[in-house]
Image: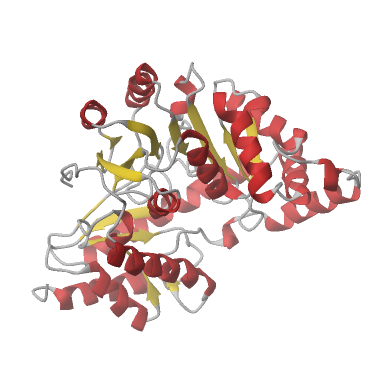
Amino acid sequence: MPQQPEPAPSDPRPETLEVEISELVFQVLSQARNRELVPLGSAFPSPELFPLEVLSRSLSRAVRELDPWRTVEDLPPGSDRLRRQISLRYLAAGYNVSAEEIVVTNGAMEALNLCLEAVTSPGDLVAIEAPTFYAALQAVERLNLRAVEVATHPRTGVDIPSLAAVLERHPVKACWFMTNFQNPLGSLMPDENKQALVTLLADRGIPLIEDDVYGELYFGLRKPLPAKAYDRQGLVLHCSSFSKDLAPGYRVGWAAAGKFATTVARRKLMSSLAAAVPSQEGLAEYLQRGGYDRHLRQLRQALSRQQAIAARAVAKHFPAGTRLTRPEGGYFLWVELPATVDALQLHRLALSHSISVAPGHLFSADRRFSNFLRLSYGHPDDKRVESAIRTVGALAHSLIGKG
């Protein structure tokens, strides 16, 4: 897929487009509540993939043994026990992150937003990917920041030379990137690119907010390292959660915020006080007893199988000229349709057939991805998926020449 030219720094969206896209984001997220829809547009994996019964037993044990005073004393940075378990996960992956720099949050979204607040001021310029996760655009808008989009390759992620050129031309104060299985592309930055990214930003003293919520969902033999593994100056604020791979609904995430950990913890205290103590302790109990890695192996296998099924269905049923990514992890396909197919119109037609898709309009500050779709293969338990892809393909055929 071709890379897109870098636009000038700007407010994330013109006002009219902001209203339209914000409403579209709300619609796509709200569709997850409707079980009647086939969830090809869902940002969430199927809850059937997770060991919720085992988690509930861990939660029950943790609550029974909980010191009542913990419910009012356990303020940021969060549960010591859980932070130690998260620190051990980093160590098992081959690098050291102290529990002292980990701040527990209400999911990764809060971690990312708190980190962005900690390293920017209104009016600052933030470098983001193109396409990017729509929540990054919304966070930039909410904090009255400006965005500059960096060329991002569908396989290898942020283009380092393009980023270097952006940094030469513009006073970027922070970067928000997904280095592992980026949403929506599914791209995976090679290790050498991650190391080059950290070095490039460290030389300029620019913080990197690293969104790594899909890092455990790899299909290869080795977990990909995050950029955080190469951080020597505390400038990488690594954010993740258990929502995508273990415990959706528990809303437990964290930021390993490096030199900004104290600032992030203070902002957490002032914004939402603390993360729920029972959820933190239940997850700590589960992690301490083991079983997480066994669950992850099964989850990865299920997602890998489903990706192959979904990709074959797209290749078979979508119009000639359609191109798609084949990520090495995560649960999204990024699909480029023929130029005359309007993805927003296709989204509306699909809804009329009880199918959700995520149009490319969501993933940029302008309309440059108007003929792209993000399709989820995160619901391997849903037997309607193949039929739904066939239907979306037929609808796409019907839009050829109508652009």
- In which quadrant of the rendered image does the C terminus lie? bottom left
Whether residue 104 is visible to the viewer of this picture, yes or no, is: yes
Who's the residue at 64% across and 23% down the image?
Answer: 98
Q: Quadrant of residue 320 in the image? A: bottom left
Q: Position of residue 341 (x, y in %)?
A: 16, 69
Residue closer to the observer: 364 or 63: 364
Residue closer to the observer: 372 or 210: 210
Residue closer to the observer: 96 or 27: 27
Q: Quadrant of residue 189 in the image? A: top left
Whether residue 40 is visible to the viewer of this picture, yes or no, is: no
Lateral position of residue 64 relative to residue 135, left or right? right
Q: Position of residue 273 (x, y in %)?
A: 71, 47
Lateral position of residue 206 relative to residue 82, left or right? left
Q: Quadrant of residue 367 in the image? A: bottom left
Q: Position of residue 362 (x, y in %)?
A: 33, 60
How many labels, in total? 0
Who's the residue at 21% across and 30% down the image?
Answer: 169
Q: Is residue 12 above or below residue 75?
A: below
Who's the residue at 39% across and 19% down the image?
Answer: 202
Residue closer to the observer: 93 or 368: 368
Who's the residue at 42% across and 57% down the image?
Answer: 306
Q: Position of residue 55 (x, y in %)?
A: 73, 52
- The residue lying furthest to the bottom in this view is 352
How did the renderer colour the structure? secondary structure
- The residue lying furthest to the left in this view is 401
